Image (tube, grey):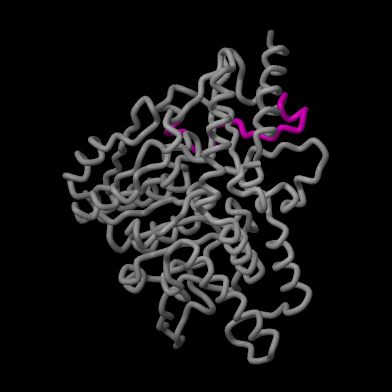
Amino acid sequence: MSLAIEHAGTAADFPTLAREGLVYLDSAATAQTAEPVIEAMDAYYRTYRASIHRGVYPIAAEATEAYEGARARAAAFAGSSAGETIFTRNATEAINLVAYSWGRANVGAGDLVVLTHMEHHSNLVPWQILCQEKGAELAYVGIDEGGRLRLDELDALLARRPKLLAVAHVSNVLGTINPIADVVARAHAAGTVVMVDGTQAAPHLPLDVSALDADFYAWTAHKAYGPTGIGVLHGRRALLEAMPPFLGGGHMIASVDEFASRYADPPARFEAGTSPIAEAIGLGAACDYLDGIGMDAVRVHSQEIVGYAVERLGAVDGLTLHGPAALAERAAVCSFSLEGIHPHDTAEILARDGVCVRAGHHCAQVLMKRMGLHATTRASFAVHSTREDVDRLVEGLATVQRIFG
């Protein structure tokens, strides 16, 4: 265990990791849920289960306070404000909210929307749909051989003054940490609105959305040691106030008449229907858990574990590691290929010994085609990951190679 977090973030904090022989290296897909998160959600279900915002009885008030308190904690965790923090089902819904609500009001025929080749499908398909519907143009920023954004290509596209740039903070395949503050500054100089997918960044990097100056920033609880079923969208207040609702129904209104309705102010305007109350409370507890460790310490630990993994994996014959060589540019992901062995076979054999990795295109088929691959094997790390976990992975790869001769 890293000295940076030797008193927190251990496997004992995550109940699933008590299973004998389990080495969980798939946190980029979904992280394990921390015990304090489970306890916080259980307390809601057991002791003050009620709907929020309208009930005047004590447990309803308690539930409302817990829900809105979770919003405040999520906002503070990300360096945003509660009034600019919207709860969604996940990061995918957060990005779709922007595409449907802001995009359909601001992108028209002939306009340009810019993506990057490293985007997850969640920050790609919604923009394809929008551009197809509106007759807008879609263009891509490429990556270099080290898995980094081609900033010269970005500048060339920004010279055409696109309406929107959608970009990942961290690649879920390559682990590349993009220079988001610089990218946002370049985009704003061109009058371009920026949508950042922060799904892989929020659990691993100290985050300050206000300092990054992104117009929209999305992330999700289940990759940050919280529950599934809730994500977060931070949006610039002036943009949110000008946007129409994404969904209509209860809670998102100020008043309703027979033929028209007046909408609530953000964030309520974008939270139609019964809220994910327990999930929000769990998200707030996950933020508290990470804050208790300290995100600077989380980042130090990540660099130590990933650095060790890069060293060990680099010594495996026939293994190609994808992504940046510099650890300062890499988050908690190691995606690799084994010569002559399909990634799914690699993952299946590793699983026989309890080593959990992900194999496939990782919802990044555009990137895979750019790399000339159909799939990779991906090991992704967490606050509970240890050098021993990396050793188990490398030992398992030796078994894979032995089986395939």
Q: Name the quarter where the C terminus is drawn.
A: top right
Q: Residue at x 19, y 49 (%)?
A: 161
Q: Residue at x 72, y 62 (%)?
A: 38
Query: Is residue 264 found left or right of 352 in the rendered image?
Result: left
Name the residue located 46 percent from the left edge and 42 percent from the top edge.
120
**Which residues, given as a range, are shown in magenta?**
349-367
304 relative to 100, above or below: above
Q: Is residue 179 above or below residue 250?
A: above
Among the 4 quarters of the image, the one containing residue 255: bottom left
x, y (%) of residue 220?
54, 56
Residue 200 in the image, given as x and y percentages of width and height: 50, 47
Question: Is 198 on the left or on the right of 338, as rendered?
Answer: left
Which quarter of the rendered picture does the N terminus lie within? Answer: top right
Say whether residue 22 is left or right of residue 376.
Answer: right
Q: Residue furthest front?
A: 3
Is 364 colored magenta in this rendering?
Answer: yes
Q: Residue furthest top?
A: 405
Image quadrant of residue 313? top right
Measuring 65% from the left and 31% from the top, which residue is drawn there?
390
Pick the residue in front: 66 or 90. Answer: 66
Q: Is residue 141 left or right of residue 124?
A: left
Q: Position of residue 368 (x, y in %)?
A: 46, 29
**Where residue 117 sits in the image (x, y, percent)?**
38, 36
